[in-house]
Image (cartoon, coloured by chain):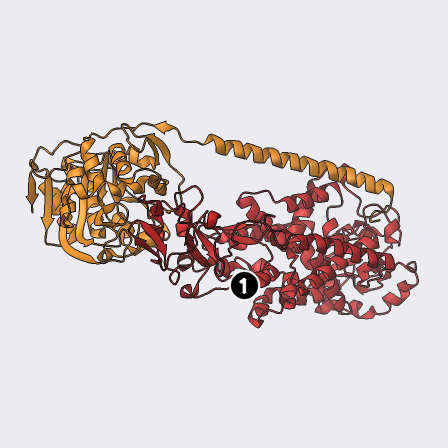
C-alpha cells in the first residue's frame, strides 16, 4: 500500500493515532471549558444600585412642568429647563448623568422619528455647565447599525460635541446587560438593562413625542425600552404595564420631551405625517411630562395606559389639573 | 542562509495572518485583504475551469504572476512563502529529535524508495498529481474541493475559525501528522497546489540559471560526490543532483530552499543564484572557494546540457521518479483510484439533497446555488468580514456538499448590505459573491406566521415593523403585514422577533413557507 513496510506503517499509525487522539481530547476539553465559562456568566440580579433620589419638585421656581413654545429646538430645551430652575436644580457637581434620547432611526429631525440633535446637545451642555463629571448618551438602535443611525439622525455628533460619551448598541445585540429586579413590578419582575443606567446619578429622558404602532404614543417612559439589552422581550409582557414597571426601575429625574415636530402616524419609525408644534416639554415628573405631551396629539393620559399606570404606581402625577404649568 | 529563509517565510506568515485578521470590517484594501487567496494558482485554475468571467480570471493576476515565476524558478513558493509550509517547518523545528525522520538515508542510494524511511517512495510522491487531477476534474462538474486541497484556503479558513472561535480541525490534523511523521509530508506527497507548481516548473526546466530569479547551481569541479545535498533535501530530490553535471538544478519538486547549499561540505560546489549571480555559495569544509562565481552569468550554466544523458545510465530502470514530472500509473493504481473516486463521489452526493428543515439563505449577490457551490472555496473570508456576523459557516446539516459554505442566518443577525458596502462580496476571492446595487438586493422575503405572531394574537408588539428600515412592514392595527415588493430579506425583523422561534422569517425568493398546520396566511399583501 502506501507504506513501504509493515513496520513503518505501524509506527506511523501509532504515532499519528496518539497525536490526533491527544489533540481531540485536548480540543474537546478546551471546548467544554469554554462552554462552562459561558454558562457561568449569567448576570446577577441586582437591585437598583444607587437610587438617585429624583429631586422633588425644584424648590427654586415652584414650577412643576414647563412648556417652551416657538423657537429653535435647542433654544426651546434651554428655556424649558430654565423655567424649572435650570439644570443645576437636577445635576449636582460631579454627577454621572445618563441621557436617553430617541435615536434609533436614521432619518433626520424633520422626520420626527428621533430626538432633534440640538435638543440632545442642549441637554448635554446644560448638564456639563451644571458640573456633571460625566454625561452618557445611550441608545439601542433599531434600523441599521449604530453608526448609521447616530450618523443619520445627527445625534452622535451633537452629543459628542456637547461633551457626552456616546454608547450606541445594535438592535440585534442583546449582550452586555445586568439583570435587575424591578421592585413592585406588576408585569415586569426582572429585566436586563445596561449597567450604566443603574449606575448613573441622574437619568434624563429626552424623547421625541411621536405616534407608536403598539403603545399608541412614544413618550418619556416608553423611551426606556431602549435601555433594555433585550428590547423586544418586553413584548412578551403586557406592554403598558411593563413600560410603567420599567420606569420605576430607571427612575428618571428629568424629562425633556422634544415636540418641535411630532409624528402623527406610522410611528415609531415613520415615515408618516408630521406636525410642527414647536414645543419642548420639561418636567422633573416624568409622568406629568408624558401626560402633558398626550395633549399635543389631542389625547389624554387615559388614552395611553402606561401613563396612568405609572401615575398609579406613585412615580408621578398624570392629572394635569393641580400642576403648576408654566409656558415660556 | 537558513536564518534568511526563516526571516522571509516567517514574515510572509505574519503578513498572511495580519491580512486574515484585517479581513475584519472594514476589510483592508491596501494591501487587499484577499491578496494571498488571489495568488493561489490552484484556485485560479479551478476558477478558470469553472468558466467564469474574464474579469474574475484577470483578478487572479497575482496567481498568474506566481505561476510565471514558478516556471522560471520552480516551487520556490513552497519554501519561501507558503504559510502552511512555514507552519510545517515550525513544527519540524520544535519537535523532539526522536520524532525527526532523517531526510535521507545514511547511505548514498539512488533508488529513493530504498534510501531511507525519511523519504516518501516515488509512488507516494505521485499521489499529489492524482489529487490535482481529481480536483480539476471534479471542478469540471461543479464540485469545488479547494477547501480540502489548497494550502492557502486551509490556512485562511483555519485562522478565521480560530478567530470565531472554533477549532480548525483540518489544520490541527495536518500539523499533528507533520509532528508525528515527516514535517513536510503534505507538501511533497499530497499538496495539489504543489503538484500544479511541480508541473509548471517542469515546463521551464530547460531554462538556464541566468533567466531564473532563484535557482540552485552546481559546479561539478568542486563537487566531492558526498551526497550531503540530497540527504538533506526535505523533498527527496536526489536524482537530479546525481544527474546534474554543471548548471542549474532541474527538479519538479525542488523548492529552491537552499538547504543543500548550506549542507554542502565542498566549498563552491553548490550555489543559490539569482539570474545567474551568486546569492549564497556553499562554504564547505574542504576544497577551495570557486573563483569568480559571483561575477555574473558565467559559462557554467551553459555548459550543462548533456548532464541528463550522462546520468541517465545510472538510475535504476523502471522507477523514473514522479518528481521528474512524469506520471507512470499502473493498472491497479488506476482502477483503485477510479474506485476511490466513485466511493468519494457517492458519499459526497448522498448529502446533496439535504434534509434540513430550514430555508437556506445566502448573502446578497451570491450566485445561484449550483454556481455558488462550484465557485465558493469555503475560505470564510466573508464570514470573517461581515460586520454583523450574520454569515455563518454551515456544518453538515444540508449535506457534505455545503460543508463550510457561508450561510446567512437572520435569526443571529441581520444583513446591512446597504451600510457595509457589501463587504462579503468585496473580500470573496472566488467570485461566488458579486456586488449588487443596494436597490437590486433581494435576499429573500419575510413571511409572518399569523398563528404565532403576537400582534396577530392581539398583543402589542410590532417590533418587526419598528426594525424594518425598508418600510416593508405595514401595521394594520397591531398586525404586521409584509409588503413583498419592498422587502429585501435583510432579516432585521426575524432577528428581533420576541417569540421563541421567530414568527416572522425570511424565505429564499420563490420559496413559500409551510407553517405548521397550514398556519397563518402565506403573506399579508391582501386580506
Q: Which residue occupies the foreground of this view, B236 or B130?
A: B130
Q: Position of residue A97 (x, y in %)?
A: 24, 38
- What's the residue at 66%, 37% (across, down)? A23
Q: Position of residue B250 (x, y in %)?
A: 79, 63
Q: Position of residue B131 (x, y in %)?
A: 74, 57
Q: Quadrant of residue A198?
A: top left
- What's the residue at 79%, 41% (across, down)? A12
A110 horizontally vs B82: left or right: left
User: Alpha-carbon neighbours of circle 1 within 10 Å: few (<14), some, or many (≥20)?
Assistant: some
Q: Position of residue B180 (x, y in %)?
A: 74, 41
SS class, disc 1: loop
- What is chain A's hue in the picture? orange
Q: Which residue occupies the foreground of this view, A242 or A63?
A: A242
- Indicate the chain on which mark 1 is placed: B
Q: Which residue is mark 1?
A: B367
Q: Of all residues shown, which one is farthest toward the bottom?
A: B54
- What's the residue at 37%, 33% (across, down)? A178
- Does any portion of residue B31 appear in the rendered image? no
Placement of B177 over or under B241, stated as above or below: above
Q: Which residue occupies the foreground of this view, B133 or A122?
A: B133
Q: Which residue occupies the foreground of this view, A79 or A307?
A: A307
- Does any portion of residue A328 appear in the rendered image? yes
Chain shown in red: B
Amino acid at each position: 500500500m502506501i507504506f513501504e513496510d509493515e513496520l513503518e506503517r505501524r509506527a506511523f499509525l501509532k504515532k499519528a493515532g496518539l497525536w490526533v487522539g491527544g489533540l481531540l481530547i485536548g480540543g474537546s476539553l478546551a471546548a467544554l471549558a469554554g462552554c462552562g465559562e459561558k454558562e457561568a456568566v449569567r448576570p446577577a440580579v441586582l437591585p437598583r444600585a444607587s437610587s438617585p433620589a429624583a429631586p422633588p419638585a425644584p424648590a427654586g421656581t415652584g414650577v412643576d412642568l414647563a412648556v417652551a413654545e416657538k423657537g429653535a429646538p435647542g433654544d426651546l430645551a434651554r428655556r424649558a429647563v430654565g423655567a424649572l430652575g435650570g439644570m443645576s436644580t437636577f445635576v449636582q457637581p460631579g454627577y454621572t448623568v445618563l441621557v436617553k434620547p430617541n435615536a434609533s432611526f436614521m432619518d433626520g429631525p424633520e422626520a420626527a422619528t428621533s430626538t432633534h440633535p440640538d435638543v440632545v446637545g442642549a441637554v448635554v451642555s446644560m448638564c456639563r455647565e451644571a458640573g456633571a463629571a460625566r454625561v452618557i448618551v445611550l441608545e439601542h438602535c433599531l434600523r441599521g447599525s449604530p453608526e448609521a443611525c447616530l450618523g443619520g439622525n445627527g445625534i452622535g455628533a451633537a452629543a459628542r460635541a456637547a461633551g457626552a460619551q456616546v454608547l450606541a448598541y445594535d438592535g440585534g445585540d442583546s449582550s452586555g446587560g445586568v439583570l435587575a429586579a424591578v421592585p413592585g413590578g406588576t408585569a415586569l419582575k426582572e429585566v436586563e438593562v445596561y449597567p450604566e443606567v443603574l449606575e448613573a446619578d441622574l437619568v434624563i429622558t429626552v424623547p421625541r413625542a411621536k405616534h407608536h404602532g403598539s403603545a399608541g404614543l412614544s413618550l418619556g417612559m416608553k423611551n426606556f425600552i431602549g435601555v433594555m439589552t433585550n428590547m423586544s422581550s418586553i413584548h412578551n409582557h403586557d406592554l403598558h404595564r411593563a413600560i410603567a414597571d420599567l420606569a420605576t426601575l430607571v427612575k428618571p429625574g428629568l424629562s425633556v420631551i422634544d415636540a418641535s415636530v411630532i409624528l402623527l402616524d406610522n410611528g415609531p419609525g415613520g415615515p408618516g405625517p408630521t406636525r410642527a408644534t414647536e414645543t419642548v416639554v420639561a418636567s422633573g415628573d416624568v409622568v406629568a411630562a408624558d401626560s402633558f405631551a398626550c395633549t399635543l396629539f389631542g389625547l389624554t393620559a387615559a388614552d395611553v395606559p402606561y401613563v396612568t399606570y405609572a401615575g398609579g404606581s406613585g412615580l408621578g402625577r398624570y392629572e394635569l389639573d393641580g400642576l403648576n404649568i408654566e409656558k415660556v | 542562509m537558513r536564518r534568511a529563509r526563516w526571516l522571509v517565510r516567517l514574515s510572509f506568515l505574519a503578513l498572511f495572518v495580519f491580512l486574515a485578521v484585517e479581513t475584519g470590517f472594514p476589510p483592508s484594501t491596501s494591501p487587499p485583504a484577499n491578496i494571498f487567496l488571489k495568488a493561489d494558482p490552484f484556485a485560479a485554475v479551478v476558477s478558470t475551469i469553472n468558466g467564469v468571467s474574464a474579469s474574475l480570471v484577470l483578478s487572479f493576476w497575482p496567481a498568474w504572476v506566481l505561476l510565471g515565476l514558478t516556471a522560471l524558478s520552480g516551487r520556490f513558493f513552497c519554501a519561501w512563502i507558503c504559510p502552511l509550509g512555514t507552519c510545517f517547518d515550525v513544527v519540524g523545528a520544535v519537535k523532539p529529535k526522536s520524532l525527526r525522520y532523517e531526510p535521507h538515508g545514511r547511505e548514498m542510494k539512488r533508488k529513493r524508495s530504498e534510501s531511507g524511511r525519511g523519504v516518501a517512495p516515488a509512488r507516494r510522491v505521485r499521489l499529489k498529481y492524482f489529487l490535482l487531477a481529481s480536483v480539476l476534474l471534479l471542478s469540471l462538474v461543479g464540485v469545488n474541493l479547494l477547501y480540502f486541497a489548497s494550502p492557502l484556503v486551509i490556512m485562511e479558513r483555519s485562522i478565521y475559525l480560530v478567530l470565531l472561535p472554533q477549532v480548525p480541525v483540518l489544520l490541527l490534523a495536518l500539523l499533528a501528522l507533520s509532528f508525528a511523521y515527516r514535517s513536510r509530508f503534505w507538501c511533497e506527497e499530497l499538496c495539489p497546489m504543489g503538484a500544479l507548481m511541480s508541473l509548471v516548473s517542469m515546463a521551464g526546466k530547460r531554462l538556464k540559471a541566468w533567466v531564473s530569479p532563484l535557482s540552485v547551481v552546481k559546479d561539478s569541479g568542486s563537487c566531492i560526490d558526498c551526497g550531503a545535498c540530497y540527504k538533506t533535501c526535505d523533498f527527496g530530490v536526489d536524482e537530479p543532483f546525481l544527474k546534474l553535471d554543471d548548471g542549474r538544478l532541474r527538479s519538479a519538486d525542488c523548492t529552491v530552499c537552499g538547504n543543500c547549499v548550506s549542507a554542502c561540505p565542498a566549498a563552491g560546489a553548490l550555489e543559490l543564484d539569482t539570474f545567474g549571480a551568486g546569492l549564497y555559495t556553499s562554504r564547505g569544509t574542504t576544497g577551495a572557494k570557486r573563483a569568480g562565481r559571483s561575477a555574473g552569468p558565467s559559462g557554467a550554466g551553459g555548459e550543462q546540457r548533456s548532464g541528463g544523458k550522462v546520468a541517465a545510465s545510472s538510475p535504476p530502470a523502471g522507477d523514473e521518479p514522479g518528481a521528474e514530472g512524469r506520471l507512470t500509473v499502473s493498472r491497479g493504481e488506476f482502477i483503485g483510484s477510479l474506485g476511490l473516486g466513485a466511493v468519494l463521489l457517492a458519499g459526497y452526493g448522498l448529502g446533496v439533497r439535504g434534509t434540513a428543515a430550514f430555508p437556506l439563505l445566502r448573502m446578497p449577490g451570491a450566485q445561484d446555488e449550483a454556481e455558488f457551490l462550484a465557485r465558493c472555496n469555503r475560505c470564510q473570508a466573508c464570514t470573517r468580514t461581515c460586520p454583523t456576523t450574520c454569515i455563518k459557516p454551515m456544518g453538515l446539516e444540508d449535506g457534505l456538499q455545503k460543508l463550510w459554505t457561508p450561510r446567512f442566518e437572520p435569526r443571529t443577525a441581520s444583513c446591512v448590505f446597504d451600510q457595509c458596502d457589501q463587504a462579503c462580496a468585496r473580500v470573496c476571492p472566488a467570485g461566488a459573491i458579486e456586488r449588487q446595487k443596494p436597490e437590486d438586493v433581494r435576499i429573500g422575503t419575510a413571511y409572518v406566521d399569523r398563528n404565532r405572531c403576537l400582534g396577530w394574537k392581539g398583543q402589542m408588539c410590532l417590533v418587526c415593523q419598528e426594525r424594518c428600515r425598508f418600510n416593508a412592514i405595514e401595521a394594520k392595527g397591531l398586525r404586521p403585514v409584509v409588503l413583498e415588493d419592498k422587502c429585501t430579506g435583510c432579516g432585521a425583523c426575524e432577528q428581533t422577533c420576541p417569540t421563541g422561534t421567530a414568527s416572522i422569517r425570511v424565505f429564499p425568493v420563490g420559496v413559500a413557507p409551510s407553517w405548521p398546520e397550514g398556519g397563518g396566511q402565506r403573506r399579508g399583501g391582501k386580506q
